[in-house]
């Protein structure tokens, strides 16, 4: 588990530099059109660079806005515009926090079922005891990280 934890920490660390991208907004007409316009390049000129047609460039720009353009196409267009196409999944928090949040959710779900059953059998635990068990279970799950934690929504 130490190897996995180290890998998680390294990935979290490398993803930190992308955090500001969470706030980047796609230009109104899309990245392709924004770059093309900034260069003063016509759709026909971009089409020539892509060995394509002006109609195809228009379709690509529409597909980008619709979220239907492929990564392969974006890479090809970016290259023809002397740009680099960047693709990333940028976590809203750290990966470690996301895992902890999911573990806490799963443990709460589990304990609420157990608590309900125990109440029905008149074996309820005090709040302090419930909190102690909760913290202990969270730490155990984080240590072993069972894959079924992602089955619970």
Image: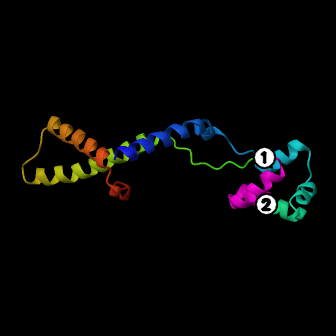
Q: Residue at x 23, y 50 (%)?
A: 112
Note whether 76 is above or below 4 in the view shown. Answer: below
> Residue beneath label 1, please?
83
Q: Position of residue 3 (x, y in %)?
A: 39, 46
Q: Looking at the rendering, which quadrant does residue 77 occupy?
A: bottom right
Q: Residue at x 12, y 51 (%)?
A: 118
From the image, which quarter does the C terminus lie in?
bottom left
| Of residues 14 and 52, the one drawn nearer to the viewer in this rendering | 14
Label 2 neighbour load within 10 Å: few <14, some 14-19, many 20+? many
Residue at the left extreme of this rendering:
122
> Residue beneath label 2, please?
60
Q: Give the magenta part as a residue range.
A: 61-82
Secondary structure mostly taken by the magenta-highlighted segment of the chain: helix
**Circle 2 sits in a helix, a strand or a loop, which is it?**
helix
Q: Position of residue 61 (x, y in %)?
A: 79, 57
- Asked if residue 69 can be seen in this view, the reply is no
Left or right for 121, reference 72:
left
Q: CA distance from mark 2 to mark 1?
A: 16 Å
Q: Are marks 2 and 1 in contact (CB under 8 Å)?
A: no
- Asked if residue 149 can be seen in this view, the reply is yes
């Amino acid at each position: 588990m130490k190897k996995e934890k180290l890998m998680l920490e390294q990935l979290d660390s490398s993803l930190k530099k992308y955090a500001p991208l969470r706030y980047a907004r796609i230009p109104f007409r899309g990245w392709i059109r924004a770059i093309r316009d900034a260069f003063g390049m016509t759709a026909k000129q971009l089409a020539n660079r892509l060995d394509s047609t002006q109609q195809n460039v228009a379709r690509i720009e529409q597909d980008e806005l619709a979220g239907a353009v492929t990564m392969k196409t974006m890479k090809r267009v970016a290259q023809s515009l002397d740009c680099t196409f960047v693709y990333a999944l940028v976590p809203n928090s750290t990966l470690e926090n996301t895992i902890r949040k999911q573990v806490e959710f799963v443990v709460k779900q589990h304990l609420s079922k157990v608590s309900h059953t125990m109440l029905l059998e008149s074996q309820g635990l005090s709040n302090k005891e419930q909190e102690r068990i909760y913290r202990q279970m969270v730490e155990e799950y984080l240590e072993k990280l069972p894959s079924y934690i992602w089955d619970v929504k």
